[in-house]
Image (tube, rainbow, N blue to C red):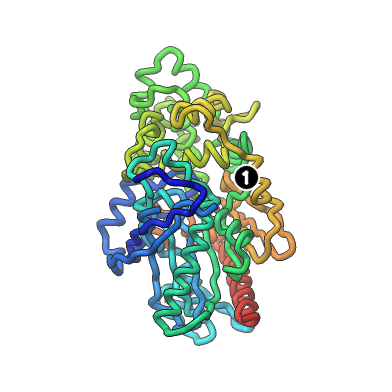
Amino acid sequence: MGTMRLSKPLVVSVSLLFFVALSGFAHGFVMTPRSLLNRLSQSSYYLTTKELWFDQTLDHYSPYQRYYEFIDYFQVPDGPIFLEICGESSCNGISNDYLRLNSTISLQTHFFYRENEFDFGRKCLNNYCIFGAAVVTLEHRYYGKSSPFKSHTTENLKYLSSKQALFDLAVFRQWYQESLNLKRNRTGAENAWFVFGVSYSGALSAWFRLKFPHLTCGSLASSAVVLAVYNYTDYDKQVGESAGPECKAVLQEITELVDRSLETNKKELKKQFGAAELDIDGDFFYFLADAAVVAFQYGHPDALCTPLVDAKKAGMDLVAAYAKYVKEYFVGTFGVSVETYNQKHLKNTAVNEGSSDRLWWFQVCTEVAYFQVAPSNDTVRSSKIDTKYHLDLCKNVFGEGIYPEVDVTNIYYGGTNIAGSKIIFTNGSQDPWRHASKQTSSPGMPSYIITCHNCGHGIDMRECPQSVSSIEDNAQSCSIPDAVNKVRHKMTEHIDLWLSECKGSG
């Protein structure tokens, strides 16, 4: 690609692969395991693989940006359009989650229902409960197959930001609406749009409503990390709180044992965890910390705590017990690759399936930070995971002059003081990311904390606990399913009301 002048927008041809599928569960910032993505791609989760094309602007202020649509239940021509935002990973389709449920279910204030009265995602058994919505999803620029360059050098990543992503969504929204009007031989018609997102894409959902309120009737911001945080110590504190006193104490003891052992037996210790390739000690500590985090973030605390607490009571080797969990669950069942934590891997500029790791770290190192540093006391993770480790990683991976402009990000979006309207914020009580989200309600922006033993990241949109093999919208496996269902009930009421107001205003 030739030299691009920033003074004039560059329009490039964008390849939009158009097919519908179940994708891996939405995640926070532990990337969806590639082994899981491979399993899903090999199954019958695709309804179409027809390719469409759409021109996108590279600099708004990519070639190859994918999108998907699901229109099986779209009420032609005036049904609403639900825009599901894909976040910091490859977007492999439209997931079979609560969004798809909401595309077919509309809760009228006079009509009460039980979940088992509906065959969700297929049909609705009462005429009052039809939204008749189309669901569309746009892959985030640079991720998956939507990279504008053949190499992800630091120079080429200059167009990767949340701000550019929001303009992508705005341009796509207008293009899709105009395309729909053209198909229906209409001019200037506007369907009612509603935006959805989980985690980083949840923040994008809130920010889209903030910056483009005329383009959407409202947004759902599930586990939305709208507050950029430099040293995010609350992350580790929540891990300890979610673990409970007994499990937390065992995890802290394991951290101390590993710290001491690494000084005298580094090579064998890393080999014990199947992480011999992690030459940088900080990468190894980060790997071990994330292994514990996913159990709470995705609603599987017992998978971690039960075997470790039992090992402690039995006087067993705690490091060996944790190594067993890491290899069998974190790497085995959950499907995380050790390579993800290797800075050598993060420095790889090739555009491939593993690119998401480098891309998200670039956003971390330039916009939002979220440095998951150890608190000064009572930490669960190793104290070696500090600010210096993160800054060194940014410099090593991307070069000099890369620094997270957290204050700029928060000034631009407002952080938890976001001055938006008609935005629903939801968070799971056990999720370490909830402290970067808006957890208190304000006028026009209701906020809900869903409280239960295994209520994790994006719980309102996902299964509880989240499965590593599929995404479902069933809440019955939650320790307190009513807590999830009550918030989903409220969510649907808000969506229904705001869509009605949108249509009423023309």
Badge 1 element? helix
Q: Which residue has dot 1 on it?
A: 409
Residue 101 horizontal/vertical position (percent) = 47, 71
Rendered residue at 35%/19% (across/down): 268
Q: Up-down: is 34 above or below 461?
A: above
Q: Nearer the viewer, residue 135 or 56?
A: 56
Res. 196 visible in picture? yes
| Residue 291 falls left or right of residue 277 | right
Q: Up-down: is 273 above or below 472?
A: above
Identify which amino acid the numbered label 1 is placed on: Thr
Residue located farthest toward the right when viewing the structure as drawn: 443
Q: Up-down: is 235 above or below 104?
A: above
Residue located farthest toward the left when viewing the structure as drawn: 42
Rendered residue at 53%/29% (across/down): 401
Residue 451 horizontal/vertical position (percent) = 61, 55
Quarter of the N terminus within the rendering = top left
Rendered residue at 40%/63% (across/down): 94
Q: What is the quadrant of residue 123 in the picture? A: bottom left
